[in-house]
Image: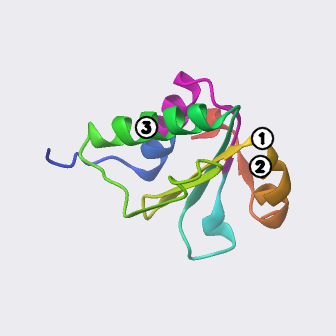
Amino acid sequence: MEEKQVSVEQMVKLIYGAIDDKLGTDISIIKISEVSSLCDYFVIATASSQRQVKAVVDSVEDALSEIGIEPRGKEGLDTKQWVLLDYMDVIVHVFDEENRAFYNLEKLWKDAPSIDIEEL
């Protein structure tokens, strides 16, 4: 499928919606571009089980694939405890509850502003 032109903010909204659709919780958007050249945004979410982690990840991939955007990289699919999807401008982190609390990316990247989905 041909990639449609979408802004990074539109990508984040699609990702957020895909996560929310599969009942992912505690969805955080962090504007990493303010403190790092790694990417523009992190989208971080929690899933209640390994099965739900997979469902959330599949939902994100499907939503972006529909507009022709595929991840540059994927990590963690084997354990489904922390899955990372790298879309270059946006990196998606889907955690199970235990690993979300342990890694606490929001604290690690506390210098980057959190963005409310309504601000995009």
Q: Which residue is mark 3?
A: 58
Name the spot of residue 95 as percent of width and height, x first: 67, 46
- Write down the region rendered in magenta: 13-29
Q: Residues within 10 Å of mark 3 (few under 14, many from 20)?
A: some
Which of the labelled discs sits on residue 97, or is there none?
1
Q: Is residue 83 above or below residue 51?
A: below
Badges 1 and 2: C-beta atoms under 8 Å apart? yes
Around disc 1, counting alpha carbons within 10 Å, would you say few (fewer than 14), some (14 to 19), or many (20 or more)?
some
Q: Residue at x 14, y 44 (%)?
A: 1
- With respect to residue 37, does 54 lie above or below? above
Q: Amino acid at mark 1?
A: Glu
Which picture quadrant has residue 31? bottom right
Residue, x 81% and y 46% (percent of image)? 98
Residue that badge 2 annotates: 100
Q: Quadrant of residue 118?
A: top right
Three-letter code for the amino acid on which mark 3 is drawn: Asp
In the rendered structure, the answer to whether residue 89 lies left or right of residue 63 reads: right
Which one is earlier in the sequence, the residue at label 2 or at label 3? Answer: 3
Q: Position of residue 73 (x, y in %)?
A: 41, 64
Label 2 vs label 3: CA separation?
19 Å
Occupied quadrant, residue 48: top right
